[in-house]
Image (spheres, coloured by chain):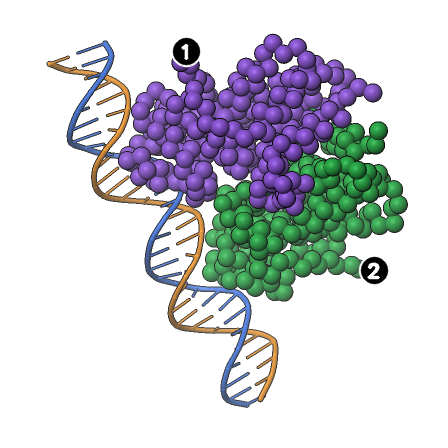
Chain colours: A purple, B green, C blue, D orange
Amino acid sequence: MELSLKFNINQKLSLRNPEESDLGRKIIQHGIVLVHQMGFEVFTFKKLAKEIGTTEASIYRYFENKHRLLLYIVDWYWSWQEYRLMFQTNNIASAEERLKIAISLLSDQVEDDVSTSYINEKLLYEIVMSEGAKSYLTKHVAEDNKAKFFKPYKDLCARIAGFIRDYNPDYKYPFSLSSTIIEMAHSQKYYMHNLPSLTDFGASKDETQIVSFLENLVFSSIRKH
Amino acid sequence: MELSLKFNINQKLSLRNPEESDLGRKIIQHGIVLVHQMGFEVFTFKKLAKEIGTTEASIYRYFENKHRLLLYIVDWYWSWQEYRLMFQTNNIASAEERLKIAISLLSDQVEDDVSTSYINEKLLYEIVMSEGAKSYLTKHVAEDNKAKFFKPYKDLCARIAGFIRDYNPDYKYPFSLSSTIIEMAHSQKYYMHNLPSLTDFGASKDETQIVSFLENLVFSSIRKH
DNA sequence: TCATCTATAATAGTAATACTTTCAACAAAA
DNA sequence: TTTTGTTGAAAGTATTACTATTATAGATGA
């Protein structure tokens, strides 16, 4: 069986659906490569155009600006993470186990996933780690939110909050704890590699310790006494 | 008694010490106002020059670029927070109490502090909440780190980690928990106001609930069993 | 007091960024 | 076959992110 994944990303993010054309897919594919390579601030549509042998104007026919492209790939990432989580937690009865899977999926080293031909999930993971916050840290966050640009992130957050609720219906902060897990899975890894003294893993650079830290954090908070 | 606070900010951040001249202080003061008003991306030295009645070139004699200015005010903020924390926890014997003070200082609504004439701490708090991560989410984080541009943040993190250690010397993740507290105090408030469904406080918009969430998170993790 | 040093202002200039517009070429759809 | 839609090519604009040059006013110092 050959499976190929497609997520329906918010139509309003792009002027033309990039999944439906060769050029569109190239924009996404090489957009990911270049943003990863040079960082979001240095990345421009002109450089992307040169990379894929097209023109700036052609790219602008797909995305209003580079922030929309960032939102697009970040939304894709969260959709993909939620899909993975659904898939991996399917038929798992224990809420504890489901939560552990969630923590592990968010913290683990991601490898490029074969079921999506033109998207490199490993690069995408690193982009979300180091550029993801820039998708919502803007003065236009309210409009973007109204346009539902953060829905995939919220959906994932709500799903994990659901696991927390399943585990302990009396715990008072399932959503905040869920967003804390998601954020910290990414931030602690960024710190570990770039600002190690903000963590306890600087010396070992051992990714599995992040999982231990988060599991300890989560389960001591929600455990029933 | 009239007290005035001065923090020694990393010399390498500025080309000329902005504290020592009228223009320099105006750059900091109105830099904070404008970054708060329009957001870091839209903010430019040209706009700042116009606001304070000087020229772009004059501002460039103080700061190489706007990212350095951001680092400067963010460093000032973390120094100020550490100072407040030291001050407020002085003579408090109980590690639990010291940790609660830390959480509260980081989460509380900050009011403009009279002891610093030209810096508006309230605006600065909001800037760090919505722009602070941009100080280290760059491709040049390694060099910036080598130049010690993140030292004030790390110092604060280490101080709170010390409180955690005092409370429970066996807890394995004092630094990661400390950076989690600092980050989440700011992020959860940002979410509460801008992306409420990532939190449990969207409806009430009650800031004290963030304190409760963080206290619960911290103390259930580090409590000895 | 004269020299000089410094900080700022005023002005101009450059390369790059973030777009927009127009038009031609071509392929697919009706 | 006409129409429509997509891309390429080329050009143009306003703004950004700087750098450089010169002039001037005020403080410092010999």
Place residue B192 in its image quadrant.
top right
Residue B119 place in picture, x, y as percent: 66, 52
Q: Is residue B40 left or right of residue A96?
A: left
Residue B183 place in picture, x, y as percent: 66, 38
Instruction: Name the residue beneath numbered marker 2.
Output: B1
Place residue D21 in its image quadrant.
bottom left
Residue sitting at x 84%, y 50%? B90
Residue sitting at x 54%, y 15%? A87
Q: Is residue B91 left or right of residue B111?
A: right
Q: Give whichever of A15, B198 is nearer the camera.
A: B198
Residue sitting at x 77%, y 21%? A223
Visible in this render: residue A2?
yes
Q: Give whichever of B10, B25 is nearer the camera.
A: B10
Residue sitting at x 88%, y 45%? B93
Within 10 angstroms of label 2, few (less than 14), some, or many (20 or more) residues? few
Q: Amino acid at mark 1?
A: Met
